[in-house]
Image: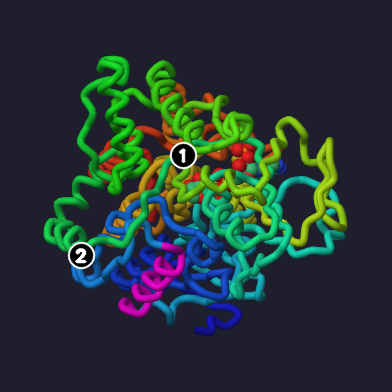
Amino acid sequence: QDAGNSREVDAVVVGAGLSGLYMLHKLRGLGLSVQVCEKGEGIGGTWFWNRYPGARVDVKSLDYAYSFDPALEQEWEWTEKYPAQEELLRYIDHVADRFGLRPHIRLRTRVTGAAFDEEAGRWDVRTDRGDRVSAQYLVMATGCLSAPRLPDLPGLDAFGGEWYHTGDWPAEGADFTGKRVAVIGTASSGVQIIPLIAEQAAQLTVFQRTPNFVIPANNHPLDPETQRAVKERYAEVRKANRESGFGVAFPEATKGAMEVPDDERDAYYRKVWYDRDNSLVSLLSGYNDLIISKESNDTIAQFVRDRIAEVVDDPEVAGELQPRDHPLGAKRPCLGTNYYETYNLPHVRLVNVRRTPLAEITPTGIRTSQEEFAFDAVVFATGFDAITGALTAVDIRGRGGVRLAEKWAQGPRTYLGLAVAGFPNLFTITGPGSPSVLSNMMVSIEQHVEWVGDAIAALRSRGERTIEATPEAEDAWTRHVGEVAQATLYPAADSWYMGTNVPGKPRVFMPYPAGVGVYRQKCDEVAAAGYEGFRLAG
Ligand code: NA7
């Protein structure tokens, strides 16, 4: 467990979440010595930190599970359609024990910097515990939603009540019984926590800047027969997931939404809304142009707005909850359980902070441009510096001492979302320029980890020491990602995909939206062509 203050390893992996753990296992399998550094007190990454009430994954359990080991995928029994945070963490702990991963993980250890030593061809990695680790390979497995963001509001230091961020929830939990509680933020995390806080709190005030499209999760205990049926043909299911668009296989739509009669379209949307086996993928994959054509997208957006009007008693509140400023899917749609219903409760109030902006946190609560509120607790469900935040938070310096954060000042530049020119032997798992957050993360994580493992194995078998993206390959890839994004509705919305939730962050669409199947093929072609676009050196 103790790494000591200074040591040499083949690889340092930063982060012990789903990516880091599999990367560790993969590299150990290749015979490498590996040091994983994890800032948390426990492993699990996203599923360690997001311990807030109601936290659960929005991809079905049987799809959101490692596929690399057939025995593991058969033996683990999921209990729900969408597992909660505790179950996911139990699964992650099981994996770590099963594959003997813990001895290689140093907990409570944040990597603060890493510099590439050009002469030695190695990374010199520093931690907040004063460690110096020299490694040939550096794998950033730091996650896409792991740098929590608080709003830039004055006064939080002097707030006399309790406050929490959903992405950094205390292990001991929080009790809101009988309290006056504020929630700021109404995306995935807010949508999950709001109905549960409403059950405890005496008063709940929700501060909403942008309403989101919230689809009923229709979560339920997983039927044993369903689980058995999937496991019987798991290999086939996994293959189809890998070749799909979002990382969850779904029959390919052959028609656009406007090519079918209104009643047929409406029937499809209703089926997705009420079906107990529905999913975000079934919602977005029903027609082949929902994320490309505004006219088609309007049909599903209006369908959701109509459902909100049906559920919410007060027409004015319903109007506030209906998203109108962005296409459905251009921001991450949310899965909810009793979300809209919660606004019918007498002790729950919605405040539109687009109209009456938040001004400050006061010692006793929150002040908007219009009104002063008293609270015992404030919950920030305000999201993350997504995709690049956890990477640029580390002082990573490549050739010539160039800082990654500087290089990306105008937006991230990568080759295939997993390598950066000028940063040899550095890999970014689910980095910007890869499908990452637009997909079932598990599929994207496994694909990256396996590609990186194969690249390192290839390098070693050829007796080469470094692999590095060429600037030309990086330019072409970065341009390609931008072009594909421009052909979609994604850039039409302000979102964390675009970096617009972080003041000063460049407005660039970060993930690669062509689908995981297409993307995988490109990565495989690059490898098969002898790592085309990379320079290998001895
Ligand atoms: P998100 O999706 O980044 O949502 C953050 C929410 O907080 C969103 O509603 C924001 O409104 C709101 N927000 C952020 N800053 C402010 C300020 N300053 N004032 C008012 N409201 C604010 O984070 P989540 O944790 O919910 O979800 C992250 C992902 O995890 C999710 O997409 C799934 O993939 C899982 P905005 O929309 O920016 O107007």
The quarter holding residue 417 reads: top left
For residue 420, side relative to residue 94 (left or right): right
For residue 332, side relative to residue 124 (left or right): left
Residue sitting at x 31%, y 15%: 258
Q: Is residue 130 magenta?
A: no
The x, y position of residue 185, in whole percent, is: 63, 46
Query: Between 361 and 247, which is closer to the camera in this rendering?
Result: 361
Magenta segment's dominant SS is helix
Query: Between 502 and 286, which is closer to the camera in this rendering?
Result: 286
Answer few, some or many: residues within 10 Å of disc 2's Cα (few below 14, many 20 plus, some between 14 and 19).
few
The x, y position of residue 200, in whole percent, is: 62, 63
Image quadrant where one finds the C terminus: bottom left
The x, y position of residue 415, in whole percent, is: 43, 40
Q: Amino acid at mark 1?
A: Pro
Residue sitting at x 62%, y 34%: 317
Find residue 333 and name its label: 1
Query: Between 286 and 19, which is closer to the camera in this rendering?
Result: 286
For residue 261, side relative to residue 97 (left or right): left
Residue sitting at x 74%, y 30%: 355
Q: Which residues are drawn in magenta? A: 84-99
The residue that disc 2 covers is 224
Ligand 1: does it lie within 8 Å of the C-beta at label 2?
no
Q: Residue furthest left?
A: 232
Model colouring: rainbow
Looking at the image, is 242 positioned above or below residue 15? above
Q: Amino acid at mark 2?
A: Pro
